[in-house]
Amino acid sequence: MKKLVPVILLLVLLVTACAKPTAPTAPTAPTAEPQQPSAPSGETKTMVIGFTASQTGKFNVSSTRQVNGLQLWIDQINAAGGIKLSDGTIVKFEAVSYDDESNKDRVQELYTRLATEDNADFLISPYSSGLTAAAAVIAEQYGKVMITTGAASDATYKEGYTLVFQVYTPASRYLTGAVDLLASLDPNVKKVAFVYENATFATSVVEAAEAYAEDKGYDVVLYEGYDAETTDFGPFINKIEQNGAEAILGGGHFQDGSTFARQIHEKGVDVKFMALLVAPPEPDFADLGDAALGVVGPSQWEPLAAFTPDFGPTGEQFVKDYEAAYNEEPSYHSAGGYAAGLVLQKAIEDADSVDPQAVKAALDKIDMTTFFGRIKFDTSAESHGLQIGHDMVYIQWQKDDSGNLVKQVVWPEAGATAKPLYPKP
């Protein structure tokens, strides 16, 4: 057996030596564009946007349209796949809201619920300055960023808040343009009456407008407020006539403004110019018929306004989408609701985060133009969050060639779509 071992080893060596060497395996040729590993799908975060709406009460018309605009933005963002952050997170939104009944006391109760029980990530204001002032306290108390729309009073942004940001042109600049328009139409008019709703918003507007008018040399012959529930404006109309007022400025909200305009027309009051808050820009104001003719109203936005946006849809696209969703023309309240969503979207995208402090810092830096107009916030300690970029346009109800009531932009001149109708019929 031992003698066989060397023989076997010798045979193995001979076979190995005679075998052909195996060619090395050629390396696989690289593809022209190496395939990158696919990125893992990001987490989807659904952010809760909390707000109240006046489903009932005196603010119902304007509030409903504001909510419609906001909801359109939410629906479109979600349908488009949400906001995509650089870490792969996809941000979508859902709304949680309650009926505030146009009641200030109810607003504080409900915004507290939104902040504590519903854990809303971001807040949108209710409609009206008074209700928003109540909500702002809660937003700041619980560290919630709140975008305010439908709320023009300057006062809310002088309370030292740091998380409340205003989309609308402030009340202090609401009617000053109407004074300028009147001056351009008739330099001989001197006697002006201010008749306005005793409410936070209207009071803020007319205080600034009255001071501006006096500074321009006008004689303010009547300066008087009325209760929000007023339906008989006879006593005020009598004073307007007794004092020889040639122009009327004031109003408050839709219901009272519409009633005031109708009764001015019915009593045949001889005034050359009338500019009212809130009511005239609403499409429903045309239901007054001839009582609407010639009435001027400041508007935060109009479908005719031709802003060139650097963020979000054009005005034409917004109008088309809104009409398709709600089967009505959008008012500036509708546009304001949508614009509030765009502002929040821009801040989240710029912050690349949904962290409240990061979003707040991004809001402080925003200077953007949307279909709604320019948006920029005051960041001083005295007026933090006050809107300083957006300007008003002024509409007037006129008749087209077919005799139909239509809105026209009449001021400023650079954006006018028609010459003002003057004096008021």
Image (spheres, rainbow, N blue to C red):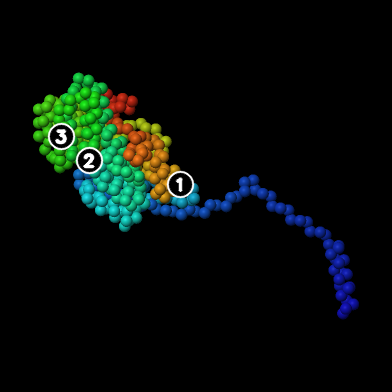
Q: How many labels does the image show?
A: 3
Q: Which of 368 and 135 is in front in this view?
A: 135
Which residue is pictured at 15% across the width and 26% down the height? 245
| Identity, as a three-letter code, of the amino acid under mark 1 | Asp
Q: In this rendering, which labeled residue sits more in front, label 3 or label 1?
A: 3
Q: Work out whether residue 170 can be spotted.
A: yes
Q: Is residue 172 positioned above or below 148 on the image? A: above
Q: Residue lying at the far top in this picture: please name it.
A: 188
Dot placed on the residue nearer the N-terminal end, 3 or 1: 3
Tell me the element at label 2.
helix
Q: Position of residue 128 (x, y in %)?
A: 25, 42
Mark 1 closeness class: few <14, some 14–19, many ≥20 residues within 10 Å: some
| Identity, as a three-letter code, of the amino acid under mark 2 | Thr
Q: Is residue 86 rendered to the left or right of residue 79? A: right
Q: Which of 14 and 332 is in front in this view?
A: 332
Quadrant where the N terminus is found in the figure: bottom right
Q: Is residue 372 rendered to the left or right of residue 127? A: right
Q: Residue 224 carries which label?
A: 3
| Identity, as a three-letter code, of the amino acid under mark 3 | Glu
Tell me the element at label 1.
loop
Tell me the residue that label 1 is attached to.
352
Which residue is pictured at 79% across the width and 59% down the height? 22
In 3D space, how far apart are the residues under numbered discs 3 and 1 (Cα atoms)? 50 Å
Q: Residue 200 carries which label?
A: 2
Which residue is pictured at 12% across the width and 36% down the height? 233
Mark 3 closeness class: few <14, some 14–19, many ≥20 residues within 10 Å: some
Q: Where is residue 193 in the image (x, y as percent from the top left)?
A: 16, 29
Q: Work out whether residue 284 can be spotted.
A: no
Q: Residues at badges 2 and 3 in contact (C-beta under 8 Å)?
A: no
Q: Is residue 124 rendered to the left or right of residue 21? A: left
Dot placed on the residue nearer the N-terminal end, 2 or 1: 2
Which residue is pictured at 39% across the width and 45% down the height? 360
